[in-house]
Amino acid sequence: MSNLILTPNIPGADDFYAELLATHEGLSKAESDALNARLVLVLANHIGDRAVLSDALKAAALSKEDAA
Amino acid sequence: MNQISDKKIFEVPLYSYERSPDQDADAPVRRKVVVIGAGPIGLGAAIDLAQQGVEVVVLDDNDKVSFGSRAICFAKRPLEILDRLGCGHEMVAKGVEWQLGKVFFDERQVYEFNLLPEKGHEFPAFINLQQYYFEEYMVNRVRAMQAQGAPIEIRGRNKVLRVTDTGDHVSLLIDTPEGEYKLEADWLIACDGAGSPTRAMMGLDFVGRVFEDNFLIADVIMEADFPTERWFWFDPPFNRGQSALLHKQPDGVWRIDLQLGWDIDKEEEKKPENVIPRLKAMLGEDVKFELEWVSIYTFQCRRMEKFRHGRVIFAGDSAHQVSPFGARGANSGLQDTDNLGWKLKLVMDGIAPDSLLDSYDVERVHGADENILNSSRSTDFITPKSEMSRVLRDAVLDLSEHYAFARPLVNSGRLSVPCTYDGSPLNTPDALPGGPARSRPGSPCADAPMGDGYLLPHLGDRFTLLTIGAEAPDSLEAEGLSIQRLALDATPEVRERYLGDAASAVYLIRPDQHVAARWPAYDAVAVETALKRAIGKE
């Protein structure tokens, strides 16, 4: 297993979540989908660690074997 | 159609039909090697064998070079192979070199790039050259070899009707303008293209269809002075939902590829009244141009399960087919024949066991899979298969306009790079601690400056012991082969490409300029063991 952090790690979690919602405010579904896609790519590049990215993809997919 | 009037090289017979004495023989004549197809791959195979003194007869159902430009982008490795075959420099002299590319999305340019090829190589990273010139120069090479008495022959308008592998030889039934005749061959190399009649006659499968698409290919002679750059469009206004490519060729000819999708009426799309408005939308209403050649190109990504079937060996598009993105067709086909030529010669001479030819299968299937993987990924980027893959693709393109990080994700074709035969049974495990990964066993040798010239012309056609700061005999005999040593100075390029962190190195190089084994110092037993392995004796 890589160093993918799946425990609370964002200081001011509520602030972050509000900022995420605010960024999407007023956007159409298509615009929001595009924004999310860009955000994923920006964050993935920042992480840059292939093993962490693979584990993040699996974690996000909520596949059974990784649910534990 | 705006066809230009003077005759093009592809309209003139280059190897007209001539009656061969074989057609009048009482019993079928047995030849050493017969190659079917006088395209770039068939000619490459034939020249390689004839250079080694192997008698080879090339049969082609036509008598001219390829019609229209077809393959136009040739990479460094095939140029190096052609140089070994004696016709690399002609290609470079005629070809157009390019380094700058521009990527457009919708109506705007999102970024541009410079290939910035590594210095210290004799051949450029890529040239653009029409396939008909490519074939013409190879035919010229065949003629020059014939003048020197090389055992090589091209028979135009010789169409193979039947192929039978008897186990002991291959027997062929051939049709000509003067009727049929029979011919036998110890070995048959089928280089008869993606639609390979040989493959069909032998009832062999062409499996793994991954992708289907159509491209309108137009060669246009333009008066406008466009720069020598590769321009690629994703989803442009003049070809909505599809891609487009503009690329320069010699003689003021421009290649334009317009992706059309799968479900189209090919005959309709090819008509000038449909082609010209598309090109005007792309180039601008005011640009004056003439159409030299228009074609619809359909491709699939697939390969034969095995490239070797007894005494019949497939090479090039007959064995594997990829999408055009990345220029991996002709480029990989020449790597096939590069891999095959020396092996076949050693087997024919009884120096290597027949099973050495199975390593052609292993190594070139590996190469084909790599090409199919790369070109399939390009295709998936260029033509997203789902709504979300389009959203992600567009996100990459939008980001690439603003941030450098997204640019490596843009995939308009990963240009052909030579295959490293990792895991090949001919490799000896890497024994050079600190050696650079790029020259590990299985790798093609990287060129480097050497004296007034370059390294690669000193390698190939035979096994070579390359030494850098290490002692070794100047020549040695083993396993029926004589190996010459080549001592290299540790220049900065040699250090970077062959030494890495090692203080000295000894490389065993195959006749196709791939690394078979490497060590920090010479050891007679280790070299002999590696040699045995490299010719399939282990």
Image: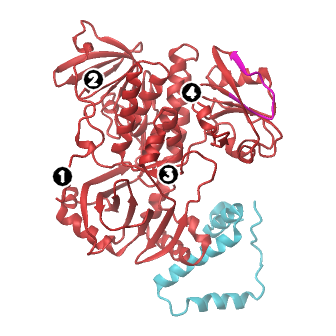
Image check: A32 left or right of B525? left
Name the amino acid, label 1: Ser
Nearer to us of marks 1 and 3 is 1
Residue type of the residue flagged with mark 4? Asp
Tell me the residue at 49%/64% (across/down): B101
Q: Which residue has dot 3 on it?
A: B126
Q: Tell me the quadrant of the picture where the C terminus of chain B can be found.
A: top right
**Within the image, what quadrant is residue A18 found in?**
bottom right
Q: CA distance from mark 1 to mark 3?
A: 31 Å
Where does the magenta region start and end? B465-477
Taking the image as shown, residue B276 lies to the left or right of residue B495, namely left
* The chain in cyan: A
Quadrant in the picture for residue B58: top left
Distance from disc 4 to disc 3, alpha carbons, whole Å, reads 24 Å
Which subunit holds the residue at mark 1? B
**Element type where label 1 sits in the image:** loop
Disc ID at residue B162: 2
Colour mapping used in the image = by chain
Task: Examine the rendered structure and indicate whether residue B68 appears above or below residue B191.
Answer: below
Q: What is the chain letter for disc 3?
A: B
Q: Mark 1 = which residue?
A: B5
Q: Which chain is red?
A: B
Residue at horizontal 18 percent and vertical 59 percent from the top: B2
